[in-house]
């Protein structure tokens, strides 16, 4: 005979919560591993740098238009989250990424 569902079964609720927390931890660990993989290559770092630039992380966001400034800050916030991923999980690669991308800019300026 199968066990009938009881919404007040504390043990079952705790087991479901633990299972959900485990899945969330595993997903977070996979996300970090994927991000480290992305940052491990020059191409991946170049893509991350482009996203940081597009988000305006390195630029002031002032605008006389409140809507425009709010939009820019929203973009910048997503870029700051990406930058936080870099510093939290690949801090040693931030300077590598910076050097690679400013090196290319310097080459274009001097050509």
Image (cartoon, helix red, strand yellow):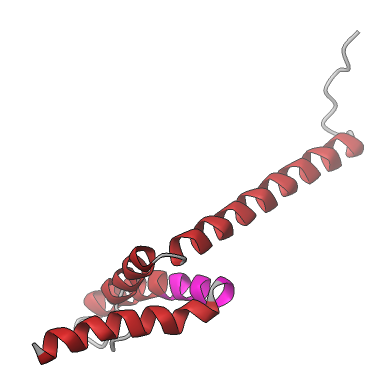
Q: Position of residue 40 (x, y in %)?
A: 47, 65
Q: Is residue 83 left or right of residue 46?
A: right
Query: In which quadrant of the rendered view does residue 15 lie?
Result: top right
Of residues 8 and 80, the one drawn nearer to the viewer in this rendering: 80
Answer with the quarter of the image where residue 89 lies.
bottom right
Q: Nearer the viewer, residue 76 or 49?
A: 49
Foreground pick, 72 / 104 = 104
Question: Residue 51 location, x and y as percent?
Answer: 32, 68
Q: Measuring 88% from the left and 17% from the top, which residue is drawn there?
A: 3
Residue under the point 32% across and 80% down:
100
Q: Main secondary structure of the magenta part?
A: helix
Give the image location of residue 11, x and y in percent.
Answer: 91, 37
Q: Where are the magenta residues, as a range?
A: 80-89
Q: Residue at x 27, y 85 (%)?
A: 103
Does 64 sit left or right of 4 as displayed?
left
Number of callouts in the render?
A: 0
Q: Is residue 64 visible?
A: no
Residue placed furthest toward the left: 111
Question: x, y percentage for residue 94?
Answer: 45, 80
Question: As drawn, is 49 to the left or to the right of 89?
Answer: left
Q: Quadrant of the C terminus?
A: bottom left
Q: Is residue 32 above or below residue 30?
A: below
| Residue at position x 74%, y 47% in the image | 22
Residue 79 visible in the snapshot: yes
Please identify the quadrant where the N terminus is shown: top right
């Amino acid at each position: 005979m199968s066990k009938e569902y009881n919404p007040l079964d504390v043990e079952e609720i705790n087991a479901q919560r633990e299972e959900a927390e485990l899945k969330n931890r595993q997903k977070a660990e996979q996300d970090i591993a994927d991000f480290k993989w992305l940052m491990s290559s020059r191409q991946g770092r170049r893509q991350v740098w482009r996203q940081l630039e597009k988000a305006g992380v390195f630029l002031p966001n002032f605008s006389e238009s409140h809507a425009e400034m709010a939009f820019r800050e929203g973009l910048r916030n997503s870029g700051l989250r990406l930058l936080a991923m870099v510093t939290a999980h690949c801090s040693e690669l931030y300077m590598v990424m910076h050097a690679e991308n400013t090196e290319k800019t310097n080459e274009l300026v001097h050509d």
